[in-house]
Image (cartoon, helix red, strand yellow):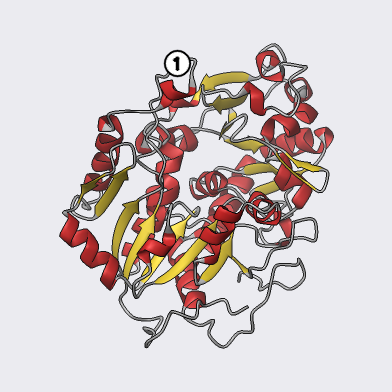
Amino acid sequence: MSERNSHISGPRLSKTSRLRVIVTGLVAQHPRLGGIAWHYMQYVLGLIKLGHEVFYFEDSGEWPYLLAGGSAPSDWIARDAQQNLVHLSDIMGRFGLSESWAYHNSAEDVWYGMPDRKRQTIVKTADVIINVSGSLVTPSAYRERALLVYIDTDPVFTQAKIAMGERDFAERVASHDIHFSFGETLSGRVPSTQFYWRPTRQPVVLDEWITDASPRPSFTTIMSWTSYRPLTWKGKVYGQKDLEFRKFHSLPRHVPQVPLELAIGSIAHPEWQADTSSPLLSTLEDAGWNLVNALQVCPDLDSYKSYVVHSKGEWSVAKQGYVHGQPGWFSERSACYLAAGRPVILQDTGFTSVVPAGRGVLSFSTLDEAANAIKEVSANYDCHSRAASEIAAGLFASDRVLKQLLDASFSTSAEPPRTNGGADRIRFR
Protein backbone atom coordinates (compact mmCIF):
# COMPACT_ATOMS: atom_id res chain seq x y z
CA MET A 1 0.00 0.00 0.00
CA SER A 2 1.60 3.28 -1.05
CA GLU A 3 1.46 5.84 1.72
CA ARG A 4 0.85 8.72 -0.66
CA ASN A 5 -2.63 8.50 -2.13
CA SER A 6 -2.64 7.81 -5.86
CA HIS A 7 -4.78 10.85 -6.63
CA ILE A 8 -2.11 13.21 -5.33
CA SER A 9 -0.28 14.37 -8.42
CA GLY A 10 1.70 17.30 -9.74
CA PRO A 11 5.00 18.78 -8.59
CA ARG A 12 5.80 18.91 -4.91
CA LEU A 13 7.24 22.02 -3.29
CA SER A 14 10.73 21.91 -1.91
CA LYS A 15 10.84 21.28 1.80
CA THR A 16 12.64 24.63 2.13
CA SER A 17 9.83 26.60 0.46
CA ARG A 18 7.64 29.08 2.28
CA LEU A 19 4.48 27.06 2.65
CA ARG A 20 0.83 27.90 3.00
CA VAL A 21 -0.20 25.70 5.93
CA ILE A 22 -3.55 24.88 7.51
CA VAL A 23 -3.40 23.59 11.10
CA THR A 24 -6.50 21.92 12.50
CA GLY A 25 -7.55 21.61 16.12
CA LEU A 26 -10.18 21.78 18.84
CA VAL A 27 -9.53 25.14 20.49
CA ALA A 28 -13.10 26.45 20.23
CA GLN A 29 -14.58 23.06 21.10
CA HIS A 30 -13.05 23.28 24.59
CA PRO A 31 -13.53 26.92 25.65
CA ARG A 32 -12.16 26.50 29.19
CA LEU A 33 -9.23 24.15 28.70
CA GLY A 34 -6.05 26.20 28.46
CA GLY A 35 -3.88 23.17 27.82
CA ILE A 36 -5.92 22.19 24.77
CA ALA A 37 -5.50 25.69 23.36
CA TRP A 38 -1.72 25.60 23.87
CA HIS A 39 -1.50 22.13 22.34
CA TYR A 40 -2.81 23.33 18.97
CA MET A 41 -1.55 26.91 19.02
CA GLN A 42 2.07 25.84 19.43
CA TYR A 43 1.80 24.22 16.00
CA VAL A 44 0.43 27.48 14.58
CA LEU A 45 2.95 29.74 16.30
CA GLY A 46 5.88 27.42 15.67
CA LEU A 47 5.17 27.21 11.94
CA ILE A 48 4.89 31.00 11.75
CA LYS A 49 8.30 31.25 13.44
CA LEU A 50 9.69 29.07 10.67
CA GLY A 51 8.46 31.63 8.15
CA HIS A 52 5.36 29.88 6.83
CA GLU A 53 1.92 31.37 6.14
CA VAL A 54 -0.37 29.64 8.63
CA PHE A 55 -4.14 29.40 9.06
CA TYR A 56 -6.12 27.67 11.79
CA PHE A 57 -9.23 25.66 10.82
CA GLU A 58 -11.63 23.92 13.17
CA ASP A 59 -14.06 21.57 11.47
CA SER A 60 -14.48 18.63 13.83
CA GLY A 61 -18.13 17.80 13.24
CA GLU A 62 -18.65 18.04 17.02
CA TRP A 63 -21.22 20.33 18.57
CA PRO A 64 -19.63 22.91 20.90
CA TYR A 65 -19.50 22.13 24.59
CA LEU A 66 -21.50 23.97 27.21
CA LEU A 67 -19.48 23.57 30.39
CA ALA A 68 -22.29 24.53 32.75
CA GLY A 69 -24.42 21.59 31.69
CA GLY A 70 -26.75 19.32 33.57
CA SER A 71 -27.61 15.68 34.14
CA ALA A 72 -28.53 14.77 30.55
CA PRO A 73 -25.94 14.53 27.75
CA SER A 74 -27.86 17.09 25.71
CA ASP A 75 -27.40 19.59 28.57
CA TRP A 76 -23.71 19.86 27.64
CA ILE A 77 -24.35 20.93 24.03
CA ALA A 78 -24.11 24.67 23.34
CA ARG A 79 -26.96 25.66 21.06
CA ASP A 80 -25.32 29.08 20.87
CA ALA A 81 -21.54 28.87 20.34
CA GLN A 82 -20.87 32.43 21.46
CA GLN A 83 -18.52 31.52 24.33
CA ASN A 84 -16.62 29.18 22.03
CA LEU A 85 -16.25 31.86 19.38
CA VAL A 86 -15.13 34.50 21.86
CA HIS A 87 -12.53 32.08 23.27
CA LEU A 88 -11.10 31.28 19.83
CA SER A 89 -11.31 34.85 18.54
CA ASP A 90 -9.49 36.23 21.59
CA ILE A 91 -6.68 33.69 21.24
CA MET A 92 -6.19 34.33 17.54
CA GLY A 93 -6.31 38.09 18.06
CA ARG A 94 -3.70 37.85 20.80
CA PHE A 95 -1.18 36.53 18.27
CA GLY A 96 -2.15 38.84 15.41
CA LEU A 97 -4.16 36.16 13.60
CA SER A 98 -7.63 37.72 13.65
CA GLU A 99 -8.00 37.23 9.89
CA SER A 100 -6.46 33.74 9.83
CA TRP A 101 -9.00 31.39 11.37
CA ALA A 102 -12.19 29.57 10.45
CA TYR A 103 -14.56 27.66 12.74
CA HIS A 104 -17.43 25.44 11.63
CA ASN A 105 -20.23 25.20 14.16
CA SER A 106 -21.85 21.87 13.36
CA ALA A 107 -24.85 22.66 15.53
CA GLU A 108 -25.83 25.42 13.11
CA ASP A 109 -23.88 24.25 10.04
CA VAL A 110 -22.41 27.75 9.88
CA TRP A 111 -18.82 28.92 9.36
CA TYR A 112 -17.34 31.75 11.45
CA GLY A 113 -14.11 33.68 11.14
CA MET A 114 -12.73 34.47 7.70
CA PRO A 115 -15.17 35.04 4.79
CA ASP A 116 -16.29 31.97 2.88
CA ARG A 117 -14.53 32.94 -0.34
CA LYS A 118 -11.20 33.43 1.45
CA ARG A 119 -11.58 30.12 3.29
CA GLN A 120 -12.31 28.27 0.07
CA THR A 121 -9.35 29.89 -1.65
CA ILE A 122 -7.02 28.89 1.16
CA VAL A 123 -8.18 25.28 0.99
CA LYS A 124 -7.60 25.21 -2.77
CA THR A 125 -4.14 26.79 -2.55
CA ALA A 126 -2.75 25.28 0.69
CA ASP A 127 0.47 23.30 0.42
CA VAL A 128 0.07 21.32 3.63
CA ILE A 129 -2.80 20.53 5.99
CA ILE A 130 -1.53 19.36 9.38
CA ASN A 131 -4.47 17.53 10.91
CA VAL A 132 -3.51 17.53 14.58
CA SER A 133 -5.23 14.79 16.58
CA GLY A 134 -7.13 13.84 13.43
CA SER A 135 -9.60 16.58 14.30
CA LEU A 136 -11.05 17.10 10.81
CA VAL A 137 -14.40 15.31 10.49
CA THR A 138 -14.03 14.80 6.74
CA PRO A 139 -10.40 15.16 5.62
CA SER A 140 -11.33 14.13 2.08
CA ALA A 141 -13.34 17.36 1.76
CA TYR A 142 -10.00 19.18 1.89
CA ARG A 143 -8.54 17.11 -0.92
CA GLU A 144 -7.33 19.81 -3.28
CA ARG A 145 -3.59 20.27 -3.88
CA ALA A 146 -2.38 20.10 -0.29
CA LEU A 147 -0.43 17.30 1.32
CA LEU A 148 -2.63 15.86 4.11
CA VAL A 149 -0.65 15.08 7.24
CA TYR A 150 -2.16 13.10 10.12
CA ILE A 151 -0.81 13.66 13.65
CA ASP A 152 -1.76 10.84 16.02
CA THR A 153 -1.52 12.32 19.51
CA ASP A 154 -3.19 9.35 21.21
CA PRO A 155 -1.10 6.28 20.30
CA VAL A 156 -2.31 2.79 21.20
CA PHE A 157 -5.92 4.01 21.28
CA THR A 158 -5.71 5.20 17.67
CA GLN A 159 -4.27 1.88 16.51
CA ALA A 160 -6.72 -0.11 18.65
CA LYS A 161 -9.73 1.63 17.09
CA ILE A 162 -8.45 0.81 13.62
CA ALA A 163 -7.74 -2.82 14.55
CA MET A 164 -11.19 -3.13 16.13
CA GLY A 165 -12.76 -2.37 12.78
CA GLU A 166 -14.05 1.16 13.37
CA ARG A 167 -14.48 1.65 9.65
CA ASP A 168 -15.36 5.34 9.53
CA PHE A 169 -12.39 6.19 11.73
CA ALA A 170 -10.02 4.02 9.66
CA GLU A 171 -11.23 5.65 6.44
CA ARG A 172 -10.57 9.10 7.88
CA VAL A 173 -7.02 8.07 8.77
CA ALA A 174 -6.51 6.46 5.35
CA SER A 175 -7.46 9.66 3.52
CA HIS A 176 -4.14 11.24 4.57
CA ASP A 177 -0.90 11.13 2.63
CA ILE A 178 1.47 10.64 5.56
CA HIS A 179 1.01 9.60 9.18
CA PHE A 180 2.91 10.68 12.29
CA SER A 181 2.44 9.55 15.89
CA PHE A 182 3.38 10.67 19.38
CA GLY A 183 4.02 6.96 19.82
CA GLU A 184 7.70 7.26 18.94
CA THR A 185 8.54 3.62 19.63
CA LEU A 186 5.36 1.67 18.94
CA SER A 187 5.94 -1.71 20.55
CA GLY A 188 4.62 -5.12 19.60
CA ARG A 189 1.93 -4.59 22.25
CA VAL A 190 0.28 -1.97 20.06
CA PRO A 191 -2.35 -3.37 17.66
CA SER A 192 -0.92 -3.51 14.16
CA THR A 193 -2.40 -1.38 11.39
CA GLN A 194 -1.82 -0.91 7.68
CA PHE A 195 -0.26 2.52 8.25
CA TYR A 196 3.37 3.47 8.68
CA TRP A 197 3.56 5.72 11.72
CA ARG A 198 6.51 8.10 11.67
CA PRO A 199 7.60 9.44 15.05
CA THR A 200 6.94 13.01 16.12
CA ARG A 201 6.34 14.89 19.35
CA GLN A 202 4.78 18.06 20.70
CA PRO A 203 6.39 21.29 19.43
CA VAL A 204 6.92 23.90 22.14
CA VAL A 205 7.48 27.59 21.44
CA LEU A 206 10.18 28.03 24.07
CA ASP A 207 9.91 31.82 24.29
CA GLU A 208 6.37 31.42 25.59
CA TRP A 209 7.50 29.24 28.51
CA ILE A 210 10.93 30.39 29.66
CA THR A 211 10.40 32.04 33.05
CA ASP A 212 12.19 33.53 36.03
CA ALA A 213 9.15 32.95 38.28
CA SER A 214 9.78 31.25 41.61
CA PRO A 215 7.91 27.98 41.95
CA ARG A 216 5.73 27.07 44.89
CA PRO A 217 6.58 23.82 46.70
CA SER A 218 3.93 21.63 45.06
CA PHE A 219 4.43 18.99 42.40
CA THR A 220 1.37 19.19 40.20
CA THR A 221 -0.28 17.86 37.08
CA ILE A 222 -3.33 18.74 35.00
CA MET A 223 -5.41 15.73 34.06
CA SER A 224 -8.69 14.15 33.13
CA TRP A 225 -9.75 11.23 35.28
CA THR A 226 -11.46 9.47 32.38
CA SER A 227 -10.98 11.03 28.95
CA TYR A 228 -13.21 8.54 27.14
CA ARG A 229 -14.55 5.01 27.37
CA PRO A 230 -11.91 2.24 27.70
CA LEU A 231 -11.30 0.09 24.62
CA THR A 232 -11.06 -3.70 24.57
CA TRP A 233 -9.06 -5.52 21.89
CA LYS A 234 -8.47 -9.28 21.93
CA GLY A 235 -9.50 -9.43 25.58
CA LYS A 236 -7.13 -6.66 26.67
CA VAL A 237 -8.59 -3.50 28.18
CA TYR A 238 -6.92 -0.24 27.20
CA GLY A 239 -8.00 1.99 30.04
CA GLN A 240 -7.58 5.53 31.34
CA LYS A 241 -5.72 7.25 34.17
CA ASP A 242 -8.25 6.21 36.80
CA LEU A 243 -7.04 2.64 36.43
CA GLU A 244 -3.34 3.46 36.82
CA PHE A 245 -3.87 5.86 39.71
CA ARG A 246 -4.91 3.02 41.99
CA LYS A 247 -1.26 1.95 42.20
CA PHE A 248 -0.23 5.35 43.56
CA HIS A 249 -3.16 6.28 45.78
CA SER A 250 -1.00 6.28 48.92
CA LEU A 251 1.94 8.22 47.44
CA PRO A 252 1.50 11.33 49.64
CA ARG A 253 2.19 9.21 52.73
CA HIS A 254 5.55 8.18 51.24
CA VAL A 255 6.66 11.79 50.68
CA PRO A 256 4.93 13.63 53.54
CA GLN A 257 7.08 16.76 53.24
CA VAL A 258 6.26 17.32 49.56
CA PRO A 259 2.83 18.71 48.55
CA LEU A 260 1.20 16.81 45.68
CA GLU A 261 -1.60 18.50 43.75
CA LEU A 262 -3.94 17.35 40.99
CA ALA A 263 -5.81 19.80 38.77
CA ILE A 264 -8.71 17.66 37.55
CA GLY A 265 -11.55 18.69 35.29
CA SER A 266 -14.94 18.81 36.98
CA ILE A 267 -16.67 16.82 34.22
CA ALA A 268 -16.88 13.23 35.46
CA HIS A 269 -17.87 10.12 33.54
CA PRO A 270 -18.50 7.39 36.12
CA GLU A 271 -19.75 5.00 33.45
CA TRP A 272 -16.33 5.17 31.76
CA GLN A 273 -14.35 4.18 34.84
CA ALA A 274 -12.68 0.80 34.62
CA ASP A 275 -13.87 -0.18 38.08
CA THR A 276 -16.98 1.48 39.50
CA SER A 277 -17.03 -0.65 42.66
CA SER A 278 -14.62 1.64 44.54
CA PRO A 279 -14.95 5.42 44.15
CA LEU A 280 -11.22 6.19 44.15
CA LEU A 281 -11.56 9.81 43.05
CA SER A 282 -13.60 10.72 46.12
CA THR A 283 -10.93 9.33 48.47
CA LEU A 284 -7.89 11.18 47.10
CA GLU A 285 -8.05 14.13 49.49
CA ASP A 286 -8.26 11.79 52.47
CA ALA A 287 -5.11 10.10 51.16
CA GLY A 288 -3.23 13.40 51.18
CA TRP A 289 -3.68 14.70 47.64
CA ASN A 290 -4.62 18.34 47.13
CA LEU A 291 -7.34 18.59 44.49
CA VAL A 292 -8.21 21.70 42.50
CA ASN A 293 -10.67 22.22 39.65
CA ALA A 294 -8.79 22.51 36.36
CA LEU A 295 -11.63 24.50 34.81
CA GLN A 296 -11.11 27.14 37.48
CA VAL A 297 -7.32 27.26 37.88
CA CYS A 298 -6.20 26.93 34.24
CA PRO A 299 -9.09 27.66 31.84
CA ASP A 300 -7.13 29.83 29.38
CA LEU A 301 -3.66 30.35 27.97
CA ASP A 302 -2.37 32.65 30.72
CA SER A 303 -3.75 30.76 33.71
CA TYR A 304 -2.56 27.43 32.30
CA LYS A 305 0.95 28.78 31.82
CA SER A 306 0.91 30.37 35.26
CA TYR A 307 -0.13 27.08 36.85
CA VAL A 308 2.73 25.25 35.14
CA VAL A 309 5.51 27.76 35.76
CA HIS A 310 4.56 28.21 39.44
CA SER A 311 4.69 24.46 40.05
CA LYS A 312 7.86 22.90 41.44
CA GLY A 313 7.56 20.18 38.84
CA GLU A 314 5.17 17.64 37.42
CA TRP A 315 4.28 14.22 38.77
CA SER A 316 1.77 12.22 36.75
CA VAL A 317 0.47 8.81 35.85
CA ALA A 318 -0.31 7.92 32.23
CA LYS A 319 -3.35 6.35 30.65
CA GLN A 320 -3.39 2.63 31.30
CA GLY A 321 -3.41 2.02 27.55
CA TYR A 322 -0.10 3.85 27.24
CA VAL A 323 1.42 1.94 30.13
CA HIS A 324 0.41 -1.41 28.65
CA GLY A 325 1.23 -0.53 25.05
CA GLN A 326 4.58 1.17 25.76
CA PRO A 327 4.36 3.36 22.63
CA GLY A 328 7.01 5.86 23.69
CA TRP A 329 4.36 8.56 24.22
CA PHE A 330 5.38 11.78 26.02
CA SER A 331 2.79 14.33 27.06
CA GLU A 332 2.47 17.74 25.41
CA ARG A 333 1.71 19.06 28.89
CA SER A 334 4.94 17.61 30.27
CA ALA A 335 6.89 19.24 27.45
CA CYS A 336 5.59 22.61 28.66
CA TYR A 337 6.73 21.89 32.21
CA LEU A 338 10.21 21.12 30.87
CA ALA A 339 10.30 24.32 28.83
CA ALA A 340 9.55 26.28 32.02
CA GLY A 341 12.49 24.57 33.72
CA ARG A 342 10.23 22.38 35.83
CA PRO A 343 11.37 18.77 36.27
CA VAL A 344 8.97 16.05 35.16
CA ILE A 345 8.33 12.71 36.88
CA LEU A 346 6.22 10.46 34.66
CA GLN A 347 4.96 6.91 34.65
CA ASP A 348 6.92 4.94 32.08
CA THR A 349 5.29 4.56 28.67
CA GLY A 350 8.46 3.50 26.87
CA PHE A 351 9.54 7.13 26.38
CA THR A 352 12.95 6.60 28.01
CA SER A 353 14.30 5.23 24.74
CA VAL A 354 13.75 8.62 23.08
CA VAL A 355 13.73 11.14 25.96
CA PRO A 356 16.76 10.88 28.29
CA ALA A 357 15.69 10.05 31.83
CA GLY A 358 17.60 10.52 35.05
CA ARG A 359 18.05 14.30 35.17
CA GLY A 360 15.20 16.70 34.42
CA VAL A 361 12.95 13.81 33.43
CA LEU A 362 12.50 10.80 35.70
CA SER A 363 10.37 7.76 34.99
CA PHE A 364 8.68 5.34 37.37
CA SER A 365 6.67 2.15 37.27
CA THR A 366 6.16 1.34 40.94
CA LEU A 367 5.08 3.24 44.03
CA ASP A 368 8.59 3.10 45.51
CA GLU A 369 10.11 4.39 42.27
CA ALA A 370 7.64 7.28 42.21
CA ALA A 371 8.43 8.25 45.80
CA ASN A 372 12.18 7.99 45.26
CA ALA A 373 11.99 10.16 42.14
CA ILE A 374 10.17 12.90 44.06
CA LYS A 375 12.78 12.75 46.82
CA GLU A 376 15.63 12.89 44.28
CA VAL A 377 14.24 15.94 42.48
CA SER A 378 13.51 17.70 45.77
CA ALA A 379 17.04 17.07 47.05
CA ASN A 380 18.79 18.22 43.85
CA TYR A 381 16.29 20.64 42.43
CA ASP A 382 18.57 23.13 40.69
CA CYS A 383 20.33 20.35 38.80
CA HIS A 384 17.06 18.82 37.63
CA SER A 385 15.61 22.24 36.75
CA ARG A 386 18.55 23.05 34.48
CA ALA A 387 18.34 19.63 32.88
CA ALA A 388 14.61 20.11 32.24
CA SER A 389 15.29 23.30 30.28
CA GLU A 390 18.07 21.60 28.33
CA ILE A 391 15.83 18.67 27.35
CA ALA A 392 13.08 21.04 26.22
CA ALA A 393 15.50 23.02 24.07
CA GLY A 394 17.12 19.93 22.63
CA LEU A 395 14.06 17.79 21.93
CA PHE A 396 10.84 19.83 21.98
CA ALA A 397 11.73 23.25 20.55
CA SER A 398 9.14 24.04 17.88
CA ASP A 399 11.76 25.03 15.30
CA ARG A 400 13.35 21.60 15.53
CA VAL A 401 10.20 19.47 15.80
CA LEU A 402 8.25 21.19 13.03
CA LYS A 403 11.19 21.41 10.63
CA GLN A 404 11.70 17.66 10.99
CA LEU A 405 7.98 17.09 10.53
CA LEU A 406 7.95 19.05 7.27
CA ASP A 407 11.24 17.57 6.07
CA ALA A 408 9.87 14.06 6.55
CA SER A 409 6.59 14.98 4.86
CA PHE A 410 8.32 16.22 1.72
CA SER A 411 11.01 13.57 1.47
CA THR A 412 9.10 10.28 1.78
CA SER A 413 8.36 9.59 -1.87
CA ALA A 414 11.42 7.36 -2.21
CA GLU A 415 10.73 5.35 0.93
CA PRO A 416 9.11 1.92 0.69
CA PRO A 417 5.71 1.63 2.40
CA ARG A 418 5.92 0.11 5.86
CA THR A 419 3.52 -0.58 8.71
CA ASN A 420 3.96 -0.13 12.44
CA GLY A 421 5.51 -3.09 14.18
CA GLY A 422 7.81 -1.88 16.89
CA ALA A 423 11.35 -2.46 15.64
CA ASP A 424 10.79 -1.10 12.13
CA ARG A 425 10.88 2.53 13.17
CA ILE A 426 12.72 5.71 12.23
CA ARG A 427 14.21 7.26 15.34
CA PHE A 428 13.37 10.93 15.90
CA ARG A 429 16.74 12.63 16.01
Q: What is the quadrant of residue 289 in the picture?
A: top right
Q: Quadrant of the C terminus?
A: bottom right
Q: In the image, what residue occupies the spot 68% across and 40% down? A: 319
Give how far across and how far down residue 296 sits, in percent: 42, 22
**As rendered, which of 395 and 195 lies closer to the eye?**
195
Whether residue 299 is visible here, answered yes or no, is: yes
Residue 276 image offset from top left, x and y in percent: 73, 20
The residue tagged 1 is 70
Q: Residue furthest top?
A: 286
Q: Position of residue 179 (x, y in %)?
A: 55, 67
Asked if residue 156 is positioned above or below residue 236 in the image, the reply reads below
Q: Residue at x 40, y 36 (%)?
A: 30
Q: Quadrant of the N terminus?
A: bottom right
The residue tagged with tag 1: helix, strand or loop? loop
Residue located at (44% from left, 79% from top):
7
Q: Is residue 420 above or below residue 330?
A: below
Q: From this view, report whether residue 345 is shown above or below residue 167.
A: above
Badge 1, how many Cα within 10 Å: few under 14, some, many 20+? few
Q: Quadrant of residue 63?
A: top left
Residue 302 shown left or right of residue 219 in the figure: left
